[in-house]
Image (tube, coloured by chain):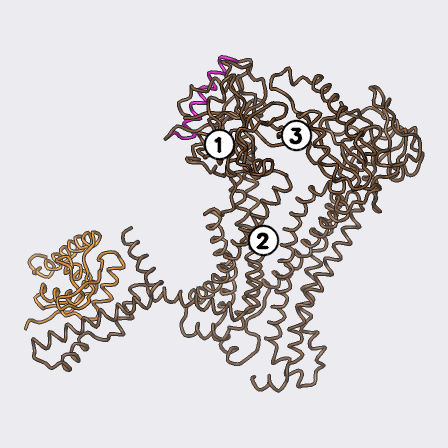
Chain colours: A orange, B brown
């Protein structure tokens, strides 16, 4: 089992947007998708997913619809809106810049100074 | 934008179905836990119970995340608001007195404001009930030099017709006030127009019966046809379906009825008869001929400014071609209803004034709001403990103010709904009253529906009122130190909230303003009742006199027909025939005429008297009227000195007058009148009139114990041909009512161009004038009632508040043996001081305003005396009402049992 990392504040929203960008999902599906795409290395407090989903829906980044799950149970499905796609692009780029900068900073050796 | 819409939708959803949203959230989380348990069972082989326990644990507190979910949806706020609203509704029921007073006052203020806006809107921006009504325009020539409209525009009309590309249709109309004479000989005036037949194509309104006017009817030599309105069809033809094809006369001209229009068609404003206006000449004289007004319909897609640009160009060209007549003429295009208003500058000013009058209603609302805020504050004070505890528990000031605002909003919304109902019925009543007073149909585009603007305005007023009555008390109640107030709250009764300066100011102002208001209403009412005809006593048997106003049609439209001398000679001939016929009717004992009837308002005249120095110009006004030489005789008024008029007195060069006894007593101070000379004094631009010799003194025709100089009357003789229109009076033996229709029949038999209106027995004359004043007075009285109720309620609230606050103090003092009555008096003292202060502030402006109004309305009665009487009565009334309002709380104070209050302290 790989070591799991704690989420940085603000990154849950980005992960949710990424997950639903890959296909329409219900809340539990979002959890599984995040575990899957992060290789199970990110630890999420499961309940915290829901306030985040509602907040994103409030902001118009995702939209929801009631439907039926694989096991024939009523479930609420989320998908990305146009506004959400835009936001995902912006945030991903921002995150990559930050991650790159952080990685570069942490690689620095005494010779480079 | 998208994000905003999503938010609003979710908020609205939460507000509307909070339980549903909550249940959905729970279901979603349950689903999550079930799925997780399933996975644990298959992957780790746990039994169902253990799997579920682990799943719940992993989820981490369903309730916690549901709360967070609600917050994320802004749902708690929505639910808070909905709870506040429910609490507001509960408050309405819990304090029925406050609810009743507040709804009563606010609904009148909101209703009056909305009704007024609707009225102005209807008047200024009314839309004709026709298809594409926004494309219908009025076109008017203006003389830029004088700033006056130029209605003599037949020349312009035929020039424009067919040459304007911005207008799809163009037409004109001219007034046609004529008798409509039916086959049975009945002749009654009808408001009609000669109109281009294109109006019926523009209107697109189908006739009720028969057909509308068509272009062929305008051709030279076409048979004369007329279309009548539904009201004429009902009143004059008893709604007979066989009316089509009937022969009638319009004035003296024969016509055939070809159609009946429904009631919703009254073009141009309130008309009921239409004949074609043939304008077939290639050219008419410029700036000459009978007046017309021009209307048109814009071509599709054309704007008013586009049409204006074209007409301005046409106007410039005509000004260049015909500088003698058209140098300063400029045609203006406006929306149809707009175009009926006069000059541009005028109408702008009129509009501003009309809309600005709304400030009065806003002021009324603010005053009502401030008063109700007093009451709400007093109620809030009784909830001091609740508010202090909530504040201590962490509720923000905004949250508590929000709650009180929501409560106030519920109150003002109820008031707005009631107010709109009031506005709806009020407007119906106003329009009906105007219709009765003017004796005409109303503008045909007026309807009884309120416009969306009125609803929006009422909603804005309701929110404004809620801000005043909810937020101000809330801020006052939540200000100050919580700890101190908590201590007071838990400690019982020592003064916590104070009924401070601002509220005292409101109550004092209220009492003062109410005194002023009652005085104004009282003075106007006094004037109406005692002097303005409402109760005018006369010295003759008015029921035995039939009266009518006679006008003769100007036949034709050519200048020659309008020649004054010919018109007058024709009028003299016809009037003499009419007079002879009436005088020979059985039962008629006298026939006379004059400019006024004795029991109506005459003409005011400033007078100079030879050899009698008179005071300032304003002090020398008397009444005057022109009468037939046998007028005084016909009204059985005896000559008490000198002689009556003779036929010779109307000859030119004769300058004589008769005065009444009031003139002798009040103006001449009882001196000899016969032989003196008087004249119309110079006033403003007008030079003094010729000297008239007083040849006789007649007994007063009206009775009034308060007559002064202003009521004195000067009679001057006049011949029938010198007057037009003319008022006739016929004395009969017995009741004069049957004579009324005889007058119409005789006039129609003499000549159909003699039009009779105001056909009434003389006891009814003047009452129509009262409708307008009575209407105005009723509105003022309504506002007066609101003011009194509010003042009384405010006083009640103050006293109730004081008694509640001082319950334990009073109890202790009673226990210590204080005299209960003196105690109550001390509680009362503040209320009495406020009433006293209010009356003192109000009484001086009240007397001043009333005194300035009194001479206007009481026709010369001693203005100051009237003012003082009315104002004293108003002040005393105000004191009694407010003192009465204090009695219930005072009695409550008297019933305080020392032992009870000591127990709770």
User: Image check: B307 left or right of A38?
Assistant: right
Picture coordinates of residue B8, whole percent (x, y): 32, 57
Mark 1 in CB contact with mark 2 (< 8 angstroms)? no
Q: In this orientation, does residue B564 appear?
A: yes
Q: Secondary structure at mark 2?
A: helix
Picture coordinates of residue B162, whole percent (x, y): 43, 19
Dot 1 or dot 2: first in sequence order is: 1
Mark 3 in CB contact with mark 2 (< 8 angstroms)? no
Q: Which residues are magenta?
A: B301-322
Picture coordinates of residue B740, whole percent (x, y): 73, 36
Task: Identify which residue is drawn at 51% across, 25% down.
Answer: B172
| Residue B426 tag number | none
User: Same chain for the residues at labels 1 and 3, yes or no?
Assistant: yes
Rendered position, B494 above or below B450? below
Dot 3 or dot 2: first in sequence order is: 3
| Residue B364 tag number | 2
Q: Secondary structure at mark 1?
A: strand
């Amino acid at each position: 089992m790989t070591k799991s990392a704690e989420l940085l504040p603000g990154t849950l929203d980005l992960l949710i947007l990424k997950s639903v960008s890959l296909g329409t999902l219900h809340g539990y599906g979002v959890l599984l998708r995040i575990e899957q795409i992060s290789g199970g290395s990110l630890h999420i407090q499961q309940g915290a997913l829901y306030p985040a989903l509602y907040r994103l829906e409030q902001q118009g980044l995702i939209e929801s619809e009631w439907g039926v799950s694989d096991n024939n149970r009523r479930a609420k499905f989320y998908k990305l809106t146009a506004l959400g796609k835009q936001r995902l692009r912006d945030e991903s780029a921002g995150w990559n810049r930050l991650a790159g900068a952080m990685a570069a900073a942490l690689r620095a050796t005494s010779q480079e100074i | 934008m998208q994000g905003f819409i999503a938010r609003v939708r979710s908020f609205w959803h939460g507000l509307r179905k909070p339980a549903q949203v909550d249940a959905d959230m729970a279901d979603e989380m349950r689903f999550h836990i079930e799925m997780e348990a399933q996975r644990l069972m298959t992957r780790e082989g746990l039994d169902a119970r253990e799997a579920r326990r682990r799943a719940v644990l992993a989820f981490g507190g369903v309730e916690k995340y549901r709360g967070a979910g609600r917050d994320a949806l802004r749902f708690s706020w929505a639910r808070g608001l909905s709870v506040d609203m429910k609490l507001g509704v509960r408050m309405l029921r819990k304090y029925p007195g406050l609810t009743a007073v507040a709804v009563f006052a606010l609904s009148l203020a909101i209703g009056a404001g909305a009704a007024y806006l609707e009225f102005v809107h209807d008047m200024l921006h009314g839309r004709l009930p026709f298809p594409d009504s926004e494309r219908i325009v009025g076109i008017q020539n203006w003389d830029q030099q004088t700033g006056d409209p130029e209605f003599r525009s037949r020349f312009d009309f035929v020039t424009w017709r067919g040459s304007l590309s911005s207008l799809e249709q163009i037409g004109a109309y001219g007034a046609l006030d004529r008798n409509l004479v039916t086959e049975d000989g009945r002749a009654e005036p009808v408001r009609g127009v000669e109109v281009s037949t294109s109006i019926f194509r523009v209107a697109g309104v189908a006739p009720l019966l028969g057909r509308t006017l068509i272009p062929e009817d305008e051709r030279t030599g076409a048979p004369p046809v007329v279309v009548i309105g539904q009201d004429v069809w009902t009143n004059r033809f008893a709604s007979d379906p066989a009316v089509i094809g009937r022969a009638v006369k319009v004035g003296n001209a024969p016509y055939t009825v070809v159609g009946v229009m429904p009631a919703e068609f009254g073009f141009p404003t309130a008309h009921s008869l239409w004949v074609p206006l043939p304008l077939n000449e290639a050219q008419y004289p410029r700036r000459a001929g009978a007046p017309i007004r021009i209307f048109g319909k814009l071509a599709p897609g054309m704007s008013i400014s586009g049409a204006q640009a074209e007409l301005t160009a046409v106007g410039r060209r005509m000004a260049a071609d015909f500088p003698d007549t058209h140098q300063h003429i400029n045609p203006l295009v406006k929306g149809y209803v707009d175009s009926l208003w006069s000059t541009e500058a005028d109408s702008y000013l009129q509009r501003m004034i009309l809309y600005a009058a709304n400030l009065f209603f806003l002021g009324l609302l603010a005053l009502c709001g401030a008063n109700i805020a007093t009451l709400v504050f007093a109620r809030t004070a009784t909830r001091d403990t609740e508010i202090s505890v909530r504040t201590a528990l962490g509720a923000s000031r905004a949250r508590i103010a929000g709650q009180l605002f929501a409560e106030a909003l519920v109150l003002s919304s109820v008031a707005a709904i009631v107010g709109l109902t009031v506005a709806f019925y009020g407007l119906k009543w106003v329009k009906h009253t105007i219709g009765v007073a003017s004796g005409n149909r109303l503008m045909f585009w007026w309807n009884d529906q309120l416009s969306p603007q009125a609803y929006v305005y009422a909603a804005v007023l309701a929110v404004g009122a809620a801000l005043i009555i909810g937020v101000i008390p809330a801020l006052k109640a939540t200000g100050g130190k919580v700890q101190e107030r908590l201590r007071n709250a838990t400690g019982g009764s020592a003064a916590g909230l104070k009924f401070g300066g601002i509220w005292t100011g409101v109550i004092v102002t209220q009492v003062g303003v109410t005194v002023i208001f009652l005085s104004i209403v009282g003075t106007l009412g006094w004037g109406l009742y005692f002097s303005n005809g409402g109760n005018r006593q006369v010295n003759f048997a008015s029921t035995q006199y039939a009266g009518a106003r006679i006008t003769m049609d100007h036949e034709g439209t050519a200048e020659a027909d309008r020649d004054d001398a010919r018109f007058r000679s024709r009028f003299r001939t016809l009037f003499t025939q009419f007079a002879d016929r009436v005088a020979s009717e059985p039962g008629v004992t006298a026939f006379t005429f004059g400019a006024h009837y004795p029991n109506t308002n005459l003409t005011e005249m400033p007078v100079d008297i030879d050899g009698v120095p008179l005071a300032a110009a304003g002090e020398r006004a008397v009444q005057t009227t022109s009468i037939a030489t046998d007028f005084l005789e016909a009204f059985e008024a005896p000559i008490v000195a000198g002689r009556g008029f003779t036929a010779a007195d109307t000859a030119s060069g004769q300058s004589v007058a008769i005065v009444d006894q009031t003139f002798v007593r009040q103006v001449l101070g009882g001196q000899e009148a016969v032989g003196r000379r008087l004249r119309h004094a110079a006033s403003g631009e007008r030079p003094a009139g010729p000297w008239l010799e007083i040849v006789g003194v007649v007994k007063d025709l009206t009775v009034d114990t308060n007559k002064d100089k202003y009521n004195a009357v000067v009679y001057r003789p006049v011949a029938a041909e010198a007057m037009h229109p003319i008022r006739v009076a016929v004395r009969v033996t017995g009741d004069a009512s049957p004579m009324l229709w005889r007058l119409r029949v005789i006039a129609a038999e003499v000549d159909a161009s003699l039009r009779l209106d105001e056909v009434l027995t003389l006891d009814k004359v003047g009452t129509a004038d009262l409708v307008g004043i009575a209407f105005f007075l009723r509105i003022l009285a309504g506002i007066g009632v609101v003011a009194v109720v509010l003042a009384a309620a405010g006083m009640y609230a103050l006293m109730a508040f004081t008694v509640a606050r001082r319950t334990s103090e009073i109890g202790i003092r009673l226990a210590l043996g204080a005299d209960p009555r003196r105690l109550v008096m001390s509680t009362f003292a503040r209320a009495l001081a406020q009433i006293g202060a209010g009356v003192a502030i109000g009484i001086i402006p009240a007397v001043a305003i009333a005194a300035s109004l009194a001479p206007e309305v009481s026709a010369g009665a001693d203005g100051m005396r009237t003012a003082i009487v009315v104002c004293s009565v108003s002040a005393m009334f105000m004191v009694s009402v407010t003192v009465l309002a204090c009695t219930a709380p005072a009695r409550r104070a008297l019933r305080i049992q020392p032992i009870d209050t000591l127990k709770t302290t």
